Amino acid sequence: MEVGFLGLGIMGKAMSMNLLRHGFKVTVWNRTLSKSHELVEHGASVAETPAEVVRKCKYTIAMLSDPSAALSVVFGKDGILEQICAGKSYVDMSTVDADTSSKISEAIKERGGYFLEAPVSGSKKPAEDGQLVILAAGEKALYEEVIPAFNVMGKKSFYLGQVGNGAKMKLVVNMIMGSMMNAFSEGLVLAGRSGLEPSVLLDVLDLGGIANPMFRLKGPTMIQGSHSPAFPLKHQQKDMRLALALGDETATSMPVAAAANEAFKKARSMGLGDLDFSAVYETVKALEEPSRNS
Ligand SMILES: NC(=O)C1=CN([C@@H]2O[C@H](COP(=O)(O)OP(=O)(O)OC[C@H]3O[C@@H](n4cnc5c(N)ncnc54)[C@H](OP(=O)(O)O)[C@@H]3O)[C@@H](O)[C@H]2O)C=CC1
Ligand SMILES: O=CC(=O)O
């Protein structure tokens, strides 16, 4: 199967590498050309524009940072719309909101193409290991056609119905994850301030009913103050923002998520946006720092 792949960031690089490893012919494009070099060493071809990828490939997959990137690659100069037509398909795996996904879907369908949104749950390591959870929605026939690619990139794919449902599911999941990361950070700080050993807290948590892979994976590095980016904090804050907008639309009160969003915004203002989203811990530490006189 021949596929195009747009966006070779943390996730896109790992996902396209997996496709190559499993025998797919892959043509890549990335805004910053240098990020395609490693893929080329592993057998990928490079295109100069997103439109060129679509011209060459029946299926084009994208993994881009946010709604503005997703829209510009479709609607911009040399974008997807310049070449999409009957017989060509576009699968956007970026985390965006339902409105963005619907705009892209409509424009592609108007030109006779097929569209699927397919955001993923799982971070850098699951992407490298082909263990993502894929949340697809849109053209059912296209979903079935691209299952071989999804099976290489993920451990489980869900088909969720109409366009927008994949985006919404992903935002709900990440809203929960961002809120959990803040509660976890506060717990680590509270333990330290109370004279407890944070590493012992990790052991206690891991044996109880709220044990989870995120605490297990991130806890030890957070305590060390190391936040090498797997899921960049700026993207987690984007997801909180989009989830809160979904809460506005549906009149869903989400005070916990709103507070978590503020903490991620604070972290961005402290210049931590490119670090892992666990760096929100540094913000909680800074906010909780007792004054000398207290
Ligand atoms: N990292 C993770 O753990 C996970 C991330 N996601 C989601 O996947 C998506 C990608 O994440 P990730 O790989 O971590 O992000 P990165 O920041 O590592 O990569 C972002 C990609 O988007 C490209 N891009 C950004 N702006 C534009 C633009 N205006 N035009 C064209 N290309 C653009 C970047 O190109 P360039 O190299 O030129 O900057 C890069 O290829 C995001 O939506 C994120 O929320 C989902 C699950 C897990
Ligand atoms: O979107 C991030 C993730 O870990 O999933």
Image (tube, rainbow, N blue to C red):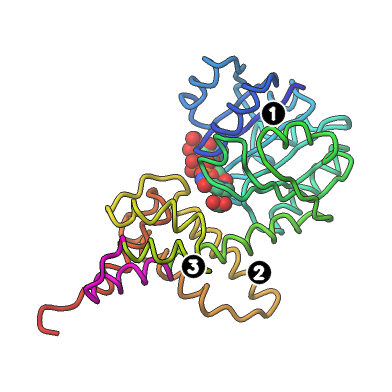
Looking at this view, name the residue that lies furthest to the front. Answer: 207
| Residue closer to the observer: 271 or 186 | 186
**Does the beta carbon of the residue at mark 1 sit less than 8 Å from ligand 1?**
no
Whether 36 is drawn above or below 8: the answer is above
| Residue closer to the observer: 47 or 234 | 234
The quadrant where residue 184 appears: bottom left
Return the x and y of residue 109 as percentages of the image width and height.
85, 43
**What separation in Å lies between label 2 and label 3 (alpha carbons)?**
32 Å
**Does the beta carbon of the residue at mark 2 sit less than 8 Å from ligand 1?**
no
Label 2 sits on residue: 246
**What separation in Å lies between label 1 and label 2 (alpha carbons)?**
31 Å
Span colored in magenta:
183-199
Label located before the other in sequence (2 or 3): 3
For the residues labelled 1 and 2, say whether their Cβ atoms are less than 8 Å apart: no
Taking the image as shown, residue 245 lies to the left or right of residue 84, namely: left
Residue at 79% in and 26% down: 58
Q: The disc labelled 3 sits on which kind of residue?
A: Gly
Label 3 sits on residue: 208
- Residue 259 is one of the magenta-drawn residues: no
Using the image, tell me which numbered label, if any, was put on residue 10. Answer: none
